[in-house]
Every structure is written in C-alpha cells, then in structure tokens.
Amino acid sequence: MSWSSPPAVGIDLGTTYSVIARLDERGTPVSLANAEGDLLTPSAVLFDGSEVVVGKEALKALAVEAECVAVFAKRDMGQRHYGKPLQGQWYPPEVIQAFVLKKLADDASRATSPFSHAVITVPAYFDEVRRKATQDAGYMAGLEVLDIINEPTAAAVAFGLQQGFLSTEGTAHRPLNLVVYDLGGGTFDVTVMRIEGGEFRTLATDGDVELGGKDWDQRLLDFAAAEFARRWGSDPRHDPNANARLWQECEEAKRTLSTRRRAAIQVLHAGQALRVEVTREQFEEQTRDLLARTEFTARQALREAGLDWGAVDRVLLVGGSTRMPMVADMLRRLCGRQPDAGISPDEAVAHGAALHAGLLLARLHGRPPRFSIRNVNSHSLGVVGTEASTQRRRTAVLIPKNTPLPVTARRVFKTQQPGQRSLAIPIVEGESRDPEACVPLGTCVISNLPPDLPARTEVEVMFRYRADGRLQVQVRIPATDIQLMQELQRENSLTQVQLDAWRLRIAGT
Ligand code: AMP
C-alpha cells in the first residue's frame, strides 16, 4: 500500500473556517484547495430556496441575506436546533456542519482520487454529545468517519512530524512537554501533552467552547456600533444585514490590528456612514478580560497536568486567533519563552488529522504505525441519583476529568421492587455535584430485566469511555451472569432514522 491509496484524509471542521488535507505519496500532509481555489473554506451555509451554497459565497451573502445564512454552527453542536431559523425552518447544527463537510469532501474528491473515509477533528473540550454530533455530521455528509481526534492532539502530531518525532530516529529525541494553545474562531482549548518517542500523550486538557475570535470581533462591533449610535442616533446592531456587514468590517479590522497599530471600521446603516478608528492598544484594552480567561484556563490545565511553566519545553500556537500579538505576548510573559509559530496555525490541525487517518489506514493494511496517541477525557462522567441523607438529586462521578483513555468504570445499582423489569439511569457530564449544572448525556434504559428478580437485586453497569471520548455502556446481572441489552436514550441527538433521511437529502444537493 502507498500513502496515497486510498487517500488518508483529515478534516478540521472549524467554527469559522474548515480545512481538508491528505497524505501525499511520501506520507506528508498537504492541504487541498476547494473549488474556489482556497485552502480555507468558510464554515458558512446559505439556504437559497432549494439551493444550498457553502463557503465564500455563503459568507458574502451574510451582508445582504443574513436571515438565510448559517455561521458558527459549531458553537451550537449538541443543541437540538441551530440558533436561528433559516428561511423559516429550524435545522439541527450537525446538519449545517454536514453541508460544510459535503462541500469539503466533494471539492477534495475532484482534486484527488475519490474517498469516503476521513478523520474529523473536534475541540479537546467537546463533551460526548458534541462528539457524537460531529460523527453524525460526517455520516450525514456521506462519509465513513474513521475516527474523531482532538484538535490540539492533531496539531501536536503535525508539529511532531515537523520536528522529526515521527521518523524512526525520532524515537531517540528527548521527551518534550508541550502546551498547545488553540484559539480558533469560536472555541478555545488548552492541552498539555508529552511527546516521547512516537507517543503523543495528553496529560490534561481544559477549555471553553464558547470563547473564540468571534468574541474579539464582537467587542469591536459593540464599540463601532456605539460610536455610530452616538453620532447618528440609530444602532446598526438592530438591523441583521447592517449587523452582519459590520461584523465583517470588524473582523477585517481585527486582522489589520495583528500587523498594524491602527485600523478603521466603516459603519453603514440607515443611509448614514461613519468611519471609526481603533488602535491596537484600545482593542487590547477592550478584550483584556477575554485574554485573561484563556490565561486562567491555561494555568488550570497545567496544574492538572502536575507541571509548572518552568517544565514546559514548547508552546504551540494553533487557530487563526493566535495571530493576535496579545496572545504571544501573554504566553511569553507566562513561560519566559517565545511560543512556536513554525507550523501553520490554520492547517496544522487538518494535517495532523490526515496523519492520524494514515495511521489508521496503515493499521488496516498491516503496516507498522508511525506514532501512537493517548488521550484523556475532558469532562467528568457521572450518574444522577438521590442522596440518602438529604433526598436531593446529586451527581456521583464515575470517571473524573483528565483520566487516561480508554477507561471503564463499574457501578452496581439495585432494583427497588420485587419483579422490577427495568431501570433508568440518567447520565451526565460535568464537574458539578448539582445535575442541573451538568450536561445531560441521556438516560441509560435497561429494559427486559428477567422476571421474578427479588427486590435489591444487583445490576452492574459498565461505563466505558473509548479513546475518542465516546461512551459505551454494558450491563450485567452478577447473580445470573446475564448480559443485558441497554439503550442510551439521548436528549439532543438525532435518531438513526433522522440521520439516514438527512444523509439522503444532503447527498442530493
Ligand atoms: P480558525 O477557527 O482556527 O480558522 O480561526 C479563525 C479565527 O481566526 C477567526 O476568528 C479569524 O477572525 C481569526 N483570525 C484569522 N487571521 C487572523 C489575524 N491575522 N489576526 C487576528 N485574528 C485572525
């Protein structure tokens, strides 16, 4: 088998931009251009009557037909609906992401040989529900999802290749402690890793799925809109098209401020115009708290990894938002060294995903792996029960956050009544003892318990987090050694019937 047949494909399904890459004949990752000739495809979807348009044209349409365009759907993953109705219809966020994946795959198939298998990346901090939604998006796009891997891990693998860790000589390298600081368009992750020989081991991960470049844009937007309102008495934020146009202006200005000390924002609304100037110092002041949130999270992740900044060998910058000089300034202050900017912050994640796809395909074809990955879970897994002393609903943690994966936890439940035929166990992810403050994963329903069981019969439930952070549940009755079928009734996921219907519909677009 060569590295190129079948192609090993990796997809970075981003909040603002997505990238697809494959391994070339020598096993080196290369990004694939879309039909417009760009390596970065905006994760924007325009619903224009029966036509669905993805990418640059959809993003352009945002300024004139904001009500028909979906952007930042990744932020809503794991919710029942994407945040706004499109042409009067509510779409699940994973469906919108599926349209993005379909375009990436279709365009890439034209540029390379056709393929159906791919690895898709997710923020390390994505919970189980969001991970499943991402896999479902791949399925609906007509793909066979080989695996989902964490974006920082993928970036570290790409970095490892560049640094020679994936060659056989690489195993002789001295171990490296690496902090991956990943600030994208809508999500923030910080992951502490150790690269040793060919092994990429995650020590700890933390993050915020609602923090990213978009929040920096919003601060500029609020500033410019307030200036406009002061001058002309009306607020462009109240008109969806003017707001969308202004957001694009502010995003541009933000990029300018990464290389220049000042930028201008043109505000157009209700037949009036205003040019608002902003300096880099003003911008940094307006967003100081956002940056501080990332610093706090980075410190926390290091603490959980049992390291201090002195033990960190390299800091890797990933995600387009790390181009803001304030990010490198902060990290330099924290760890006393310049962060690594050697890998492309836009492409590294897709490249690492392609390398991982290559690893999985090689394994299928009996070739020796070039590297291995050890992951941790990013959220504690728990079951909800009633505390005997207070009679309050409480979460009992079964697998604490940052446990190396795969891992299995066992817990014994007891039937309450004689002859009881079913048990329902609510499962949550999160760090709080209060179930309301956790993310509901669903209910594990154990039906068809054998008849005539006495009250207080033990039912053993095994919760297994796989290496990809997805959950599997198995049930056994120790007294009878019966293995039972169980069903995870999910709260915010599409059913298989819905997934199949969408897969068919998306294939036809
Ligand atoms: P990603 O999700 O990694 O593609 O990152 C996209 C985010 O990076 C968006 O919020 C962009 O506005 C932001 N971004 C890209 N280039 C720059 C730049 N030169 N300066 C500041 N932010 C940028």
Image: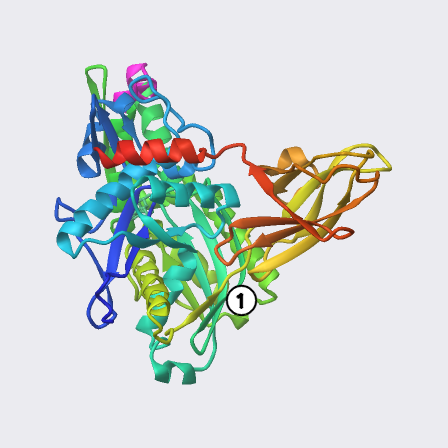
In the image, taking residue 278 as reference, residue 337 lies left or right, namely: right
> In this rendering, does residue 261 appear at all?
no
The correct choice, above or below, for 308 with respect to 261 in the image is below
Q: Residue at x 84, y 34 (%)?
A: 390
Q: Residue at x 54, y 32 (%)?
A: 491
Q: Position of residue 319 (x, y in %)?
A: 35, 52
Residue lying at the far right of the rendered structure: 389
Crowd band around label 1 with a 10 angstrom C-alpha radius: few (<14), some (14–19), many (20+): some
Q: Magenta residues, as a range? A: 230-242
Q: Position of residue 344 (x, y in %)?
A: 28, 60
Identify the secondary structure beneath mark 1.
helix
The foreground one among 423 and 302 is 423
The foreground one among 401 and 241 is 401
In the image, taking residue 389 as reference, residue 15 lies left or right, namely: left
Q: Position of residue 407 (x, y in %)?
A: 60, 59
Residue 371 in magenta stretch: no
